[in-house]
Image: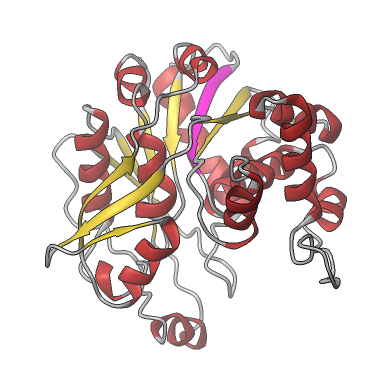
């Protein structure tokens, strides 16, 4: 085996993608590129998007923090929320969201703002907004109902609605810089993250599927630990891989799935929210399955070190032999 640097694209958003990046950044043989969803409509990001007309900064911020040189200190400073003050709309926003939004307003370019933040944080890797065009996530449910917005899609899951179709309105185009970056990827990891509101929107952007079709190395799906409400009852990791394969026009090559179980008390707490361990299901023939105990805490979050070693084992075996 001859070791070399691997150019790795990591797609997603939410809290899942930063967990993956935080573990992988310590591997000197990986050159990391986070390709991040830009269609968040909730919380601080959604409010800044509506009030200032800026792109939602939250997912990009979390990924930049995960790749930063001093992640702990950066998180303490930039994820702290400003106090609510009279006669101001700044209260409740994180310092990092405001900083990134201000940098975008003054530079006139969101990608330049992201690059500036990455330089400030000393990030080991690149963070790319998948698109800089304003768009809204839409979903259709099995009963024919259509809803708009990331928050509304999540609420639909909670009410027991089963998603049958998702799309962006208006359609968003891939950022040219991202298209160029994908052309150099040796492999791609998708997830973990909320399936319909973090992972799928990133892949729905026009140009992403064409870019991924040309990647010569494996497409790896890191399956989530849990389903996401009553609407995903019966959903499996195999189903997730099939959705992704249809969307990007090529099959998922490898599924990394969890077999670990937390305490009964933890499972009961999530079960009360109708969130249950995601079963593997029946992946398509030819899809490699890598399993391991990745859930090691009382919070549903992949263990960073275990996940990073699992991903490296797949990449090194497939790309370096």
Residue 264, x across and y down, in percent: 46, 86
Q: Residue sitting at 52 percent across and 67 percent down?
A: 300
- For the residue pair 279 and 210, the one nearer the viewer reads as 210
Residue 239, placed above or below residue 99 = below
227 sits left or right of 88 in the view: left
Locate residue 168: give its quadrant: top left
- For the residue pair 287 and 242, the one nearer the viewer reads as 242
- For the residue pair 234 and 127, the one nearer the viewer reads as 127
Residue 200, placed above or below residue 312 = below
What is the magenta segment's predominant secondary structure?
strand
Magenta includes 8? Answer: yes
Q: Residue sitting at 61 percent across and 43 percent down?
A: 53
Residue 317, x across and y down, in percent: 43, 26
Q: Which residues are magenta?
A: 6-12
Locate residue 260: give its quadrant: bottom left
213 sits left or right of 181 in the view: left
């Amino acid at each position: 085996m001859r070791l070399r640097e691997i150019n790795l694209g990591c797609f997603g958003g939410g809290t899942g993608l930063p967990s993956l990046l935080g573990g992988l950044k310590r591997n000197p043989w990986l050159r990391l590129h986070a390709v991040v969803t830009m269609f968040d409509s909730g919380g601080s990001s959604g409010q800044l998007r509506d009030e200032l007309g800026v792109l939602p900064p939250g997912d990009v911020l979390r990924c930049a923090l995960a790749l930063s040189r001093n992640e702990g200190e950066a998180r303490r400073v930039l994820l702290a929320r400003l106090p609510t003050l009279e006669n101001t709309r700044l209260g409740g926003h994180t310092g990092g969201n405001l900083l990134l939004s201000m940098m975008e307003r003054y530079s006139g370019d969101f990608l330049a703002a992201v690059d500036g933040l990455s330089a400030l944080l000393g990030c080991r890797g690149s963070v790319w907004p998948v698109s800089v065009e304003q768009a809204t996530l839409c979903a259709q449910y099995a009963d024919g109902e259509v809803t708009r917005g990331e928050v509304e899609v999540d609420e639909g899951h909670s009410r027991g609605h089963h998603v049958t179709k998702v799309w962006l309105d208006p359609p968003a185009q891939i950022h040219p810089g991202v298209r160029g970056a994908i052309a150099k990827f040796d492999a791609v990891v998708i997830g973990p993250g909320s399936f319909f509101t973090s992972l799928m929107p990133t892949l729905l952007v026009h140009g992403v599927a064409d870019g991924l079709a040309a990647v010569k190395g494996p497409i790896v799906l890191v399956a989530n630990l849990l389903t996401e409400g009553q609407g995903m009852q019966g959903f499996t990791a195999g189903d997730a891989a099939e959705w992704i394969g249809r969307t990007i026009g090529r099959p998922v090559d490898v599924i990394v799935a969890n077999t670990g179980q937390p305490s009964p008390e933890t499972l009961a707490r999530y079960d009360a929210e109708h969130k249950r361990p995601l079963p593997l299901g029946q992946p398509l023939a030819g899809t490699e399955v890598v399993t391991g105990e990745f859930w090691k805490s009382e919070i549903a979050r992949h263990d960073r070190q275990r996940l990073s070693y699992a991903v490296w084992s797949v990449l090194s075996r497939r790309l370096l032999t």
